[in-house]
Image (spheres, rainbow, N blue to C red):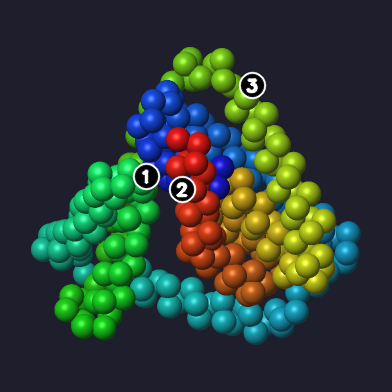
Amino acid sequence: MEGGHGYAAAFGQTIESFGVENAISFGVTAATLGLIFGGILGGPVGKLLIERHNLKPNVDLNTNRRSSNKNKSTVKKDISFNLNPLVFMEHLMIILLCINTGDLISKLAFKLNGFVLPIVVTCMFIAVIFRNVNDRVKYFKIDFNIITFIGDISLGLFLTISLMNIDLYKLSSLLPLILFMVICQVIFIIVYGVFICFKVLGKTFDAAVIISGLIGHGIGATPNAMSNMVTLTDKYGPSPKALLVVPMVSSFLLDIVSVPCILFFINIFS
């Protein structure tokens, strides 16, 4: 369930190209169940660790509140941006250019050597290359508030379309298998987080908050992780380390490992 609905749809499409039926529906259904379990279990597990070990935050609450208020005011200023049709279309064209270039590379890789390289992977790397090159040459002024705005709209459309395509009737025979797979991963991520990661991270307050984020993301997605951690920090105190590390790892660094692993197994078992 790593990667949520995005990976389920992207890699499911690739798997269906090999003749596997309902791969996307199977993956999206599992991802949906993962979001539910990740949101339900992450907070209580973190709460149990904090209270059982009597953990306290390591930063001053008053200082954090002042910095938090500063951050909130900064965020409010950043939210407002100048959106007009021309600027919107310029940013949209950049995104479409990255998508089409990534699509071309994916098709060339399959045509030349038969290697399966999902479009989501190539598009992601093209976008990273474009961003870093553009930061150097400063050819185009990118407003990331507009990029985020387009991303929010696209994500909403993507999730709606993906969930509408789930045919539960066709998956009824596979439902026990989906539930078994999801429950096994839920048990694994909780055991791994509580008995291994929590100890490795030092059994601190930050570690407990990170574990709640790990559970949220490990069987759900990054928004689950953030929701779990914010719920704990609102009740027990701030954890800047957790709120910095988990989004960075789950949103970017994890793809460096997870994408090659998924591609490896797809190509091996294809």
**For marks 3 and 1 on the same chain, the one whose residue lies earlier in the sequence:** 1
Quarter-of-image position of residue 122:
bottom left
The front one of 119 and 91 is 119
Q: Is residue 103 visible?
A: no
Amino acid type, mark 3: Pro
| Percent of width and height locating residue 45 | 76, 52
User: Taking 65 as reference, is 109 above or below it?
Assistant: above
Question: Who's the residue at 70% across and 52% down the image?
Answer: 43
Question: Who's the residue at 48% across and 15% down the image?
Answer: 169
**For marks 2 and 1 on the same chain, the one whose residue lies earlier in the sequence:** 1
Residue 49, labelled with which disc? none
> How many neighbours does mark 2 have within 10 angstroms: few (below 14), some (14-19), or many (20 or more)?
some
The front one of 26 and 69 is 26
Left or right: 48 as drawn, with respect to 127: right
> Could you give the CA–CA distance between mark 3 and mark 1, rounded to whole angstroms?
30 Å
Left or right: 22 as drawn, with respect to 40: left
Q: Secondary structure at mark 1?
A: loop
The residue wearing badge 3 is 176
Are the residues flagged by discs 2 and 1 in contact, CB closer than 8 Å? Answer: yes
Amino acid type, mark 1: Val
The residue wearing badge 2 is 263
The residue wearing badge 1 is 116
* Residue at the farthest left position: 86
> Could you give the CA–CA distance between mark 2 and mark 1, rounded to whole angstroms?
7 Å
The quadrant of the rendering that contains the N terminus is: top right
Amino acid type, mark 2: Leu
Q: Secondary structure at mark 3?
A: helix
| Percent of width and height locating residue 163 | 42, 32
Quarter-of-image position of residue 15:
top left
Q: Secondary structure at mark 2?
A: helix
User: Taking 129 as reference, is 194 above or below it?
Assistant: above
